[in-house]
């Protein structure tokens, strides 16, 4: 599997929601980016790291990565390797044994940012899910792939598309919802 290195760029609120935010990660060359939905709580945690708040030195992700790096020879990286039912499949990978431990993508990114752990994405998935990179100040509307939206987000997007009389988008969203429901019924 070919991998592409990702770097955390920013986290911002999703307009119209109180509990969700959007993480932006880009490749080494700042040519492509992916958007990942996270909870507001994770967004606050990431923002604390971006602002380099001293309290983070005593928080769980930093303490755990410090213990691992100072007391063992273990080396890890984060791997985003698929999308299943609107969620990125993400693993913490032992760099020596390639043993994988599943982790929620938002928690994995928080761990990677906190512990300076490399983040990779399967190259095929990056090409499928990414869009051209845009500078943070230009991110007024960031595209989010339909296959990474929760069912709740799809329902809200369908409502908005119908309200805006964008029936083509409403149809596309409805098809994604049907596809997922069909997978759950099987």
Image: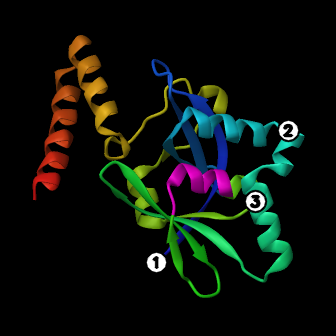
First reached walking from the N terminus: tag 3 or tag 2: 2
Q: Quadrant of residue 133?
A: top right
Q: Are marks 3 and 2 in contact (CB under 8 Å)?
A: no
Residue nearer the viewer, 41 or 50: 41
Residue identifier under label 3: 115
Residue identifier under label 1: 1
Is residue 180 visible from the viewing direction of this image? yes
Q: Quadrant of residue 93?
A: bottom right
First reached walking from the N terminus: tag 3 or tag 1: 1
Picture quarter with the C terminus = bottom left
Residue nearer the viewer, 181 or 130: 181
What element does badge 3 sit on?
helix
Instruction: Answer whether residue 105 is magenta in the image.
Output: yes
Residue 87 is left or right of residue 114, and the answer is: left
Real-space CA distance between mark 3 and mark 1, rounded to the nearest whole angstrom: 25 Å
Disc number for residue 53: 2
In the image, residue 10 lies at what x, y percent?
Answer: 66, 38
In the image, residue 184 lies at what x, y percent?
Answer: 16, 53
Residue at the image point whose x is 52% and y is 76% from the top? 100
Q: Nearer the viewer, mark 2 or mark 1?
A: 2
Residue 28 is left or right of residue 39, and the answer is: right
Please provide the residue range marked out in magenta: 103-111
When the figure is inspected, residue 21 is found, relative to residue 35, above or below; the finding is above
């Amino acid at each position: 599997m070919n991998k592409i290195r990702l770097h955390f760029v920013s986290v911002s609120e999703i307009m119209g929601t109180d509990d969700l935010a959007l993480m932006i990660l880009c490749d080494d060359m700042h040519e492509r980016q992916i958007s990942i939905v996270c909870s507001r709580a994770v967004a606050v945690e990431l923002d604390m790291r971006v602002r380099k708040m001293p309290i983070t030195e005593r928080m769980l992700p930093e303490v755990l990565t410090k213990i691992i790096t100072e007391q063992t020879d273990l080396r890890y990286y984060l791997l985003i390797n698929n999308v299943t039912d609107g969620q990125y499949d993400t693993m913490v990978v032992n760099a020596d044994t390639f043993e994988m431990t599943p982790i929620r993508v938002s928690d994995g990114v928080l761990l990677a940012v906190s512990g300076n752990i490399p983040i990779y994405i399967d190259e095929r998935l990056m090409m499928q899910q990414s869009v051209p990179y845009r500078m943070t100040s230009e991110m007024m509307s960031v595209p989010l792939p339909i296959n990474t939206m929760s069912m709740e987000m799809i329902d809200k997007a369908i409502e908005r598309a119908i309200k805006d009389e964008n029936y083509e988008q409403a149809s596309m969203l409805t098809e994604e919802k049907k596809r997922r429901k069909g997978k759950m019924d099987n």
